[in-house]
Each structure stands twice: as structure tokens, then as C-alpha cells.
Image (cartoon, rainbow, N blue to C red):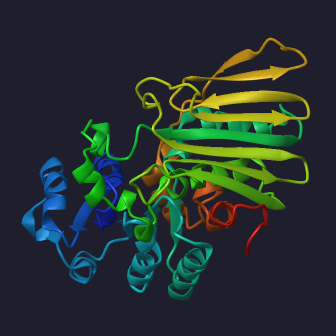
Amino acid sequence: MKEKVWRVAGINFDHFHMGDLLREVFDHPLAEIVGISDEQPERMEDAQKNFSLDASKVFTDYRACLESTKPDLVILCPSTKGHAEWVEKVASYGVGILLEKPFAASLADADRMIAATQASGSSLAINWPLRWYPSHVTAHRLVGEGRLGDVREVHFYDGNRGPLWHGVGKIELEPTAERKAASWFYKSEEGGGSLLDYLGYGTTLGTWYHGGEKPIEVMAMIDTPEGLEVDEHSITVARYKAGLSKFETCWGTFTDPWTHQPQPKCGFVIKGSAGTLSSYDCESVVTLQDAEHPEGQTIPADVLAGPQKGPIAHVLDCLERDVPVEGPLSIEVSRIGQQIVDTAYQSAIEKRMLPLLD
């Protein structure tokens, strides 16, 4: 029998990661881009050119796109504030949805999205790009194998020079004051700021490393530079039964981790009852410290292939096998990550420790 070719549409280009995700569809042997849609046609020009899309596949009305192309999977990249609205719009068509991080602007919005997809029978996966870094996947494997014993602490530091320093494909841009003023990344009402941009990475993958455990209470502090309405630096401390974990976000690292690792390094350090493990973004190894190797043992990162290579390959494989996505892409793990983010955000406003919100 001829293998199914999956029909994929990209809707809403608020987040520049849309171009990267469409590239994965374009390169997938059993997928095709059947349509793209955005209310601002100029934001689709690069995608139309890069993927040689006929004008008949380009829409400014998402409904026309969905009704004309009948996709199996829709990639959504709206601003954080718009996640719930756009998932509800698209879920009503009963299609699979891959939503670019973060999960939502709030836990209430996350629950709206879960309810909308469950009511329509749509599947929902949340893409956290750090999930596809070989080092972090290797770290999870080693944790699962018990190489660290019981996980007691997860330390996360991540970010970049700022969201306006780069565009699709990490092409470098100049973050002028005018661009900041126009960007949703710097608007509080749109869900901007480093905390909402990056904290979900740490708390969601942190939940993955913690085996799905929830913290008991959370405390956070943010720094909002003069002249801006959103933070560019945040530190969150979460208390679990086993101890404290820390999640730090930064727009303003000295270098971007995909070019040169800044100091502190971006990534994770995990401490267990029997060892420690460092796993940094974009690095080809992880370092395990245990009783046999107190000086630290360098372990090559796993080679990711097939359905584990990236979000498009993984989600299409799950659709093919009719199984739910797992780990950070799942609503179960991402919802816990969102609980921590919501509590941290409220803690930063109230300037006090809070029990985990629900």
C-alpha cells in the first residue's frame, strides 16, 4: 500500500519559529505543506518563497485555509496571549495541532485549550525546542536509568541575547528601540517578557526530569529594565518534597548558546541521591558525576533519528500510530510546567512565596 502523505498547514506567524517548523515539514519525506495563513501577508513572504508555495496555498483567512486545504495537522505560532483563542478556533475543525511554546499565557488559558481539543477530538502537542536537543534527551535517559539515583534538584539557566537579535534560521538582526516598541515580545498584554518566554522550558523539562512530580511552593523575582514593561531576567525557586530546584531566565546573555555558550552556561544541572549531571544546550556531550567517576565522566549525547529527530517527525509518527504524545509535548507534563509558571508570575507580582496554584 502507498504510504500516507500528511497534509500540514501553518497558521499565524506571530512567532518566527513558524519558518523552522515549516522547514521540517518541507524536509519530511511523508509530509507536505498544503497551506499557510496569516492576517499580515508580508509575514508569509519568506515561507512562500523558501518552500515554493503556489499562491493558491497562501491565505489571509484561517477558515478559508482550513476549509480549502483540509490538513491533518496544523502548526500554530501565535503570540502567547493568543494561544487559547487560536487553539479554540482551529480545534473546532477536528484537526491535530502542534502549538509552538510556551503552553499558554495562564493556567486558565491552558485549561481552555485542553477542553477545546478534547471536545472536538483534536490532538494537541506543545513544542518545546529544548526537548529536541540531544544532550537534554540523553540526560532524561540517564535519569530514567537511575544513574543519578533519586532526583533531588533541577537547576535551569537559559535564554539568549534577546528575541529581536535573530529571526528565522537564527539570522542575526538588530534589536532597535523601534523594533522593541513594535514587538509583542515586549508587550505585557501579549504575554511578553523573559519569564513567560523561557520559564516554561525549565519548568516543563524540569517536570520531565522530576518524573512528573509537582512542587509544593514557589517564589520568584523579576527584573524589568527602565523603559520596558516586561522583564528581561527572572529567577524562580520551587520547593519539592526532595528539596529546592531553581529556574532562571535571561534575555541578555553575553552570547547566544547556539553560537557560543555564555557564562553561566545555558542548560540544566541535575542533582540526584547518587550523582550529578550537567546537560547544556547545543553541546554534544553530557557530564555525569557519580561514585565511580567523582571527577566527572563525559558521555556522548544520543544521536536522535526517525520520530525522535524533531517535533514534526514525532507528532506525525504519533498520529500515524494513533498514540498520544509523551513527555514535555504532552498536556499533562506541560500543564504542570504552566502551574509553576503561573505561580512564579504571581509570586513576582506579590513579592512573596506562594503555594502551587491550580
Vertical placement of 323 versus 299: above or below? below
Vertical placement of 324 versus 121: above or below? above
Residue, far left? 55
- Looking at the picture, how far across and down is residue 148, in whole percent? 84, 32
User: Foreground: 216 or 329?
Assistant: 216
Q: Image quadrant of residue 342? A: bottom right
Q: Image quadrant of residue 355? A: bottom right
- Looking at the picture, how far across and down is residue 108, in whole percent? 60, 79
Taking the spot 75% from the left edge, 41% from the top edge, the residue there is 154
- The answer to whether residue 1 shows anywhere in this view is no
Residue, far top? 295
Taking the spot 23% from the left edge, 76% from the top edge, the residue there is 65
Taking the spot 31% from the left edge, 53% from the top edge, the residue there is 16
- Looking at the picture, how far across and down is residue 131, in whole percent? 56, 46
Q: Image quadrant of residue 263? A: top right
User: Foreground: 310 or 196?
Assistant: 196
**On-image quarter of the N terminus:** bottom left
On the rendered structure, is 217 left or right of 334? right
Vertical placement of 319 versus 132: above or below? below
- Looking at the picture, how far across and down is residue 327, in whole percent? 65, 55
On the rendered structure, is 102 left or right of 236? left
- The answer to whether residue 118 shows anywhere in this view is yes
Vertical placement of 268 versus 229: above or below? above
On the rendered structure, is 7 left or right of 221? left
User: Foreground: 349 or 328?
Assistant: 349
